[in-house]
Image: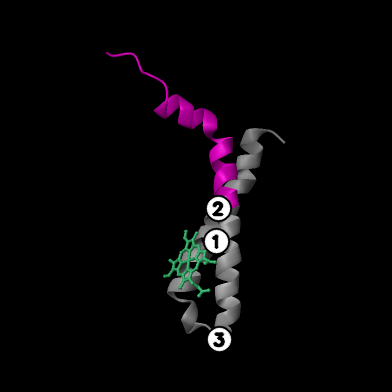
Amino acid sequence: MNKQKFLKVVNPILGLMLTIQILGMTFGRMLPIDPELRFGFHKWNGWALGVVMIVHISLNWSWVKANYFTKKKKG
Ligand code: HEM
């Protein structure tokens, strides 16, 4: 799988995990879920999110280099 195809898979997963991570702790208490299960899920989803974020940044590293670490010509 090339980078672009991989990013098309990774990005929606990243967005979904981030949304669940934030909404789960902000509004999760309104749901009939055992708090221990909710905190446990938040903890492991949080760590997994960190890993997926690193994968996302690695796949976009050429963009990061081109936009932050390359001097642009003036004018
Ligand atoms: C990108 C967003 C977030 C990430 C990556 C994240 C990650 C984590 C991780 C890894 C832990 C476990 C820490 C440990 O083991 O000591 C944790 C715990 C916790 N987080 Fe988050 N979190 C995020 C957003 C939020 C938000 C939006 C809230 C609240 C509105 C929140 C509330 C908490 C609480 C209350 C705990 C402690 C849970 C417990 O007692 O087990 N987090 N978070």
Can you tell which quarter of the image residue 46 is in? bottom right
The answer to whether one can see residue 35 in this image is yes
- Does the CB distance between marks 2 and 1 fall below 8 Å? yes
| Residue type highlighted by circle 1 | Gly
Spatial CA distance of label 3 from label 1 is 21 Å
Q: Is residue 54 above or below residue 48?
A: above
Residue 31 x/y as whole percent: 52, 82
Residue 2 x/y as whole percent: 68, 33
- Image depth: mark 3 or mark 1 in front: 1
Which residue has dot 1 on it?
46
Which residue has dot 3 on it?
32
- Does the CB distance between marks 3 and 2 fall below 8 Å? no
The CB of the residue at mark 2 lies under 8 Å from ligand 1: yes
Q: Quick one: label 3, few (<14), some, or many (20+) residues within 10 Å?
A: few
| Residue type highlighted by circle 3 | Pro
Q: Is residue 16 above or below residue 26?
A: above
Which residue has dot 2 on it?
50
What residue is shown at x 55% (from left), y 74% (from top)? 39
Q: Is residue 43 above or below residue 67?
A: below
Spatial CA distance of label 3 from label 2 is 27 Å
Depth order, front residue of 63/35? 35
User: Dominant secondary structure of the magenta stretch?
Assistant: helix
Magenta stretch in the rendered image = 51-75
* Residue 52 colored in magenta in the image: yes
Left or right: 26 as drawn, with respect to 39: left
